[in-house]
């Protein structure tokens, strides 16, 4: 097995660490931010966190998106098996205005034969409030909704249960990260050979004599921070700002409406019911914008569109909603986009640092997570074969 440091504890880093640990590798997660933190440069807690694609199989890009079907089924399985995971199976309704059709003769997304319960929505069943938007195509399927903060903590707990260690640490280079692999200490060995609970495994009081060594591999899952670690790729960095509004009000379905207003072509509408109550209203994509200020006019547009497409959100007879939207908080999130799509690549840096990059998912981190982790594990398998490591799966 290989000794691996995963740098970053967003959904990409945690999913990658979990999948590597299942393959039998020893994994240390090193991150500035950990589940439970809130920071504008820690993207995962702010995410909408659902699953959607639009292109047809006539568009060659669908082959790049096909990897995401892994996340679809993995996360639905999590929803079925563990109600504490923050994942909620939910019907997804998608509406595409004519201005946003991927193709003139659009006949549905590439995944229509692969997901559960896919159906075309007939025009007579479109929301009455959608009439002004010239909806040209609608479809629905069984998908999922994730509460990010709960799910990130769930992933970390699964990593720990599977033998991963983690440490909060700001590092300046991938070389520095390599030297933060946490060796088993005496306490860890005793825990593994006993029936003691694993909660508290990373309690600093129990690892005051922690020993560190050099990892065989560093997996770079640094998201927004990637340009700091891979400056030669900085020109491809493309931050994508999102503005969201969390309200107390509840809705029946997860609703996605592609851009409907030619004056605001980067504004979709996502109406996202949270498992723990309330609804996240969002859908904005402001490219190359890292500012953290709120646009009140954008918030007003989000509110107006949400009430049109999900009128029950202000219906007092539905889930005891108030007759108006009750804001909980507004949020800004900066997504870690990359012009040429996610960077999945192995390279050897100075000082013989072996690195596999896994960053640049943009707005698709949750739906990319398992597919990208699989690609990383394949590269790790190649590395182990070349270096004659043996593996012992923990599946």
Image (cartoon, rainbow, N blue to C red):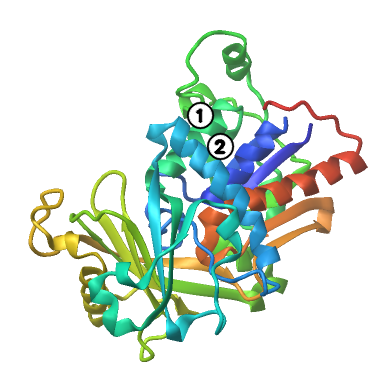
Q: Is residue 194 left or right of residue 350?
A: left
The residue depicted at 51 percent of the width and 73 percent of the height is 239
In the rendered view, would you say 288 is above or below 82?
Answer: below
Q: Is residue 349 left or right of residue 72?
A: right
Q: Nearer the viewer, residue 115 or 386?
A: 115
The residue depicted at 35 percent of the width and 83 percent of the height is 134
Q: Element at badge 2?
A: strand
Residue 17 horizontal/vertical position (percent): 62, 41
Viewport quadrant of the C terminus: top right
Residue 354 horizontal/vertical position (percent): 80, 51
| Circle 2 residues within 10 Å: few <14, some 14–19, many ≥20 | many
Q: Nearer the viewer, residue 236 or 317?
A: 317
In the rendered view, would you say 167 is above or below 99?
Answer: above
Sequence-wise, the earlier of marks 2 and 1 is: 2
Q: CB of mark 2 within 8 Å of CB of mark 1?
A: yes
Residue matched to label 1: 202
Q: Nearer the viewer, residue 177 or 7?
A: 7
Determine the image quadrant of residue 68.
Answer: bottom right
The residue depicted at 55 percent of the width and 79 percent of the height is 102
Residue 295 horizontal/vertical position (percent): 28, 79
Residue matched to label 2: 166
The residue depicted at 28 percent of the width and 44 percent of the height is 276
């Amino acid at each position: 097995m290989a000794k691996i440091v995963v740098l970053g504890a967003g959904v990409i880093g945690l999913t990658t660490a979990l999948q590597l640990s299942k393959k039998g590798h020893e994994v240390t997660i090193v991150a500035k931010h950990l589940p439970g933190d809130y920071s504008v440069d820690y993207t995962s807690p702010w995410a909408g966190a659902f699953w959607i694609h639009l292109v047809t199989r006539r568009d060659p890009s669908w082959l790049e998106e096909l990897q995401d079907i892994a996340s679809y089924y993995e996360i639905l399985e999590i929803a079925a098996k563990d109600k504490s995971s923050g994942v909620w199976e939910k019907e997804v309704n998608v509406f595409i205005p004519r201005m946003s059709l991927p193709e003139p003769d659009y006949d549905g997304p590439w995944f229509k034969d692969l997901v559960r319960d896919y159906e075309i929505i007939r025009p007579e069943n479109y929301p009455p409030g959608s009439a002004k938007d010239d909806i040209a195509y609608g479809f629905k399927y069984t998908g999922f909704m994730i509460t990010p903060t709960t799910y990130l903590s769930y992933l970390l707990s699964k990593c720990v249960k599977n033998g991963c260690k983690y440490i909060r640490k700001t590092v300046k280079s991938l070389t520095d990260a390599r030297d933060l692999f946490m060796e088993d200490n005496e306490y860890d060995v005793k825990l593994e050979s006993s029936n003691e609970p694993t909660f508290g495994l990373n309690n600093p009081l129990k690892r005051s004599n922690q020993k560190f060594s050099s990892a065989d591999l560093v997996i770079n899952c640094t998201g927004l921070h990637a340009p700091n670690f891979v400056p030669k790729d900085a020109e491809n960095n493309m931050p994508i700002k999102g503005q969201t509004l969390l309200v107390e009000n509840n809705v029946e379905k997860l609703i996605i409406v592609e851009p409907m207003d030619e004056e605001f072509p980067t504004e979709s509408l996502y109406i996202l019911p949270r498992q723990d109550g309330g609804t996240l209203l969002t859908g904005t994509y402001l490219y190359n914008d890292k500012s953290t200020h709120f646009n009140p006019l954008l918030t007003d547009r989000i509110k107006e569109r949400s009430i049109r497409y999900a009128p029950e959100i202000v219906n007092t007879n539905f889930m005891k909603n108030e007759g108006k939207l009750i804001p909980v908080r507004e949020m800004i999130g900066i997504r870690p986009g990359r012009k040429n799509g996610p960077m999945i690549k192995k390279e050897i840096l100075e000082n013989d640092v072996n690195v596999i990059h896994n960053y640049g998912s943009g707005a698709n981190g949750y739906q990319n997570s398992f597919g990208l982790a699989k690609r990383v594990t394949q590269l790790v398998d190649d590395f182990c074969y070349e270096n004659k490591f043996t593996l012992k799966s923990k599946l």
